[in-house]
Amino acid sequence: VPRGTAIELTGRASTPLVSVGLRRDRESVALRADGRAFDGRFTPAGSGVWAWYARAADAAVEDLPAPVDVTVVPDSAPRVDILAPLADTLVAALDTVSVEGAASDDHGLAAVDLHLWRPGPGGTRAERTQRLAVSQGPAWSGSVMIDLSAQRLNPGDALHVTISAVDNSPWAQHATSRELLLKVPSLDERRQLARAAADSAVEAVQRTAAAEQGLQQRTSEMSRERMNHPVAGRTPRDSTAGRQNANTLSYETAEKAKALAKEQQDLADRVNKLQQAAAQLRDQLARAGALDSSLSRQLREAQQMLRDALTPQLMDEMRKLQSSANKLNAEQTNQSLANLAELQKQLREQLEKSAKMLQRAAFEGAMQTLHDEAQDIAAAEDSIGKDSSQAAVGSRQGADSARASSGRTGAPTPAEQRLADRSDLLSNAIHNLQQKLADADAKAGARNADDAHTFASASERSMRQRGDAQTAAAEMQRAAGAMQQARDQQVAEWKHELTSEIDRAVQELLQMSRQETRMEQQARTGQATAEQLRGDQSAVDQGVQQTQQRLQAQAQKTTLLSGRAQRAVGDAAQKVAEATKLAADPRNAMRTPSAMGDAADALNRAAAALARDRQRANMASSASGFAEMLQQLQEAAKKQGSINAQAQGLMPLPGQGQLSPEAQATARMLANQERRLAQQLDDLSDAAGGDRAAQLSKEARAVADALEQGRVDAATVARQEQLLRHMLDAGRSLQKDERDDTGKREAQAAVNPKLFTPGAAAVSGKSAEKYRVPTWDELRGLSADERRAILEYFKRINGGGLHP
């Protein structure tokens, strides 16, 4: 019976009874005797065997029923659990976390509570309880939002969360869920998470690209197999039934085609998840304080590439393949397979390019986090060194200086041990990064191995010199400098690799263009035989293909190689291939010289496009060239403002007719300036993030056409003003992206401000600065104008011109 159950007993005896009942050990239950009948009830407190006893008027009754065996089932406690989050979670100090829970009990629930606590000073607990439900039925489920900003968590703190429930039984059974930890990671942990997220994102993109390559090969093989092996059992072509059978797909082949389409859909879903992984990597680097403007831009470009990889044409071909396979239409299936294979090739190339860019961003982010971590360790070691020096001075003044001195060289303090552990982790991370650099690019890894080795060696020397904390701090500071130098050299190496390849490509294209021109002249004058022309043209064709392949490999690693230059090289390769095809057939002797001339012109255009990219890459101070594009947009806006002012001066007064000849000549001059400005915007459109510039170029050409026709009226001036606003808006929008705002800013009052006491110090240079000027690392996430304004502000307040 369940605990608390009352058992009722009734019966009759063959003789009148004086007393009757049950007993167990020292317990007994007396029942009411009424002649031969008896009855009663009792509530057993626990399990056991109850034996009967009975007495008649003259003697005890010997003939008794079998004992009553009672098993008391205890009341079960409520069941309560936290359903989400499923495991301990890393959170930001200002996050709002949704916690979902559920509870149940057969007696019903009297109360459900949420408990939050965090460790306090001296081993105490700061706990808060929130009532979630009262007098519920047998089950409860719900969610609660926890505002972490109200908990005032610091990096490294953890909030403990549990849900408890009390049932509605007389015993008020209590149960508590598992404990959920909401932890705010420390800065070191954030840096480790950022590096892990970078490695994971790169690996995921590489795996997806490899899977796409395998799928593309299988799609191409199936397409070729369908074309080379027609449907078995087809009837002669001249019969109607034969034509129908020839266009009928077998069930097995249709299932294979649908499986390919399904696999491509799964890979498309993986690409969508890769976009989220790239966004999460950007957030992780921002939280770790390692996201400067250049790195932020690289990650946004990688996200954009992943978004552009899934083209609408690819999705349409997947649907067409599934539809034709369902209809068993062989002809449409063959065409869809061929089209899908080509689109899969483009998707694979885009994924490979995204993987290269993410990998470079991961390397840069890792270098920056390791540099920042080394600086933090250096600062901590310097602080320990200063404290030790002060303690040593005090101990020498006292009577126990010997004991203090010997104690200093003994076991490390907890703070020193934690610092040693951090140094160990840092050294291991540096060695891992060095190995990844070498594996990813043996050439670049060799160039940066010395810097990484310098960093690791300095870390090891720092750990060995723990007894002299100030010397250890200096070693670690040098290690941080080595890591920053490694990052700078790595970025410079990537740019040098690109510019060197462009220089080589330009020289090769110009040389092949001269060779094409020479062969054109020989073909027109008959100075060379058809066989000689065919061999020379074939050599040029192979050279252009090799140059194009090397440039495509570079395009997978950087955005400084513009789409215009790649299209120009592709067009040149096509023109050269056409000339090679014509030269191979003597019947095309009349058309071959013209095709060679066209190929020479295309090669010259490709070299010119690459030369423009070379100039932009050489002048770029960032890996993406984004900052330079912003500057050029600002200069274009200034030119547009000047053109607008001159055009407004040409507007005729009310009542006047058309423009005078002098005004028309000025308008044509302004039209030429507007077209040159449009050309500059066209050049910008090939750079990273240049989609806005392409739209501005179209607007500028429309304004130039109006000025060329002498339409200097209110409508034209309004279009010019609108164009200027769009230029300014584009610059501001891109700058906003570049600043990498990470959320709300909250002002806080100063606590225990440090007072400035000059004393006997010098009154010039840094000694006279009342407020410390921010360093470059602290200002690197801001634009140039913002940095200039902040430095000017500190200059003024330190000079006494402004009192905050």
Image (spheres, grey):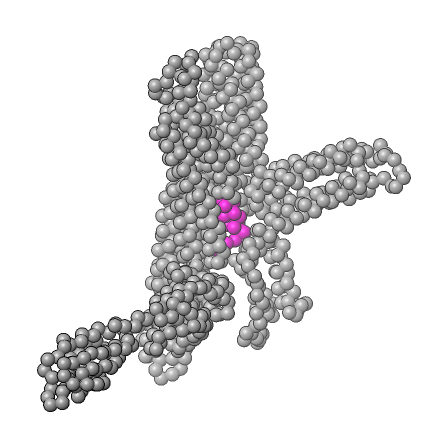
Q: Which residue is drawn at 32% across and 75% down?
A: 407
695 sits left or right of 197 in the view:
right
- Check the picture and name the quadrant holding the C terminus: bottom right
63 sits left or right of 151 in the view:
left
Residue 629 place in picture, x, y as percent: 60, 44
- All told, the count of numbered labels is 0
688 sits left or right of 640 in the view:
left
Up-down relation of residue 292 to residue 99 (above or below):
above
Res 380 → quadrant = bottom left
Q: Which of 262 and 38 is in front in this view?
A: 38
Q: Nearer the viewer, residue 520 or 305?
A: 305
**Magenta segment:** 290-303
Q: Residue at x 28, y 76 (%)?
A: 5
Res 667 → quadrant = top right
Q: Can residue 389 be seen in this view?
A: no
Q: Which residue is drawn at 24% across and 74% down?
A: 72
Q: Nearer the viewer, residue 289 or 600?
A: 289
Q: Which residue is drawn at 38% across and 59% down?
A: 86
Residue 567 place in picture, x, y as percent: 54, 31
Q: Can residue 331 be seen in this view?
A: yes
Residue 105 place in picture, x, y as percent: 35, 68
Q: Which of 245 and 783 is in front in this view?
A: 245
Any magenta on residue 559?
no
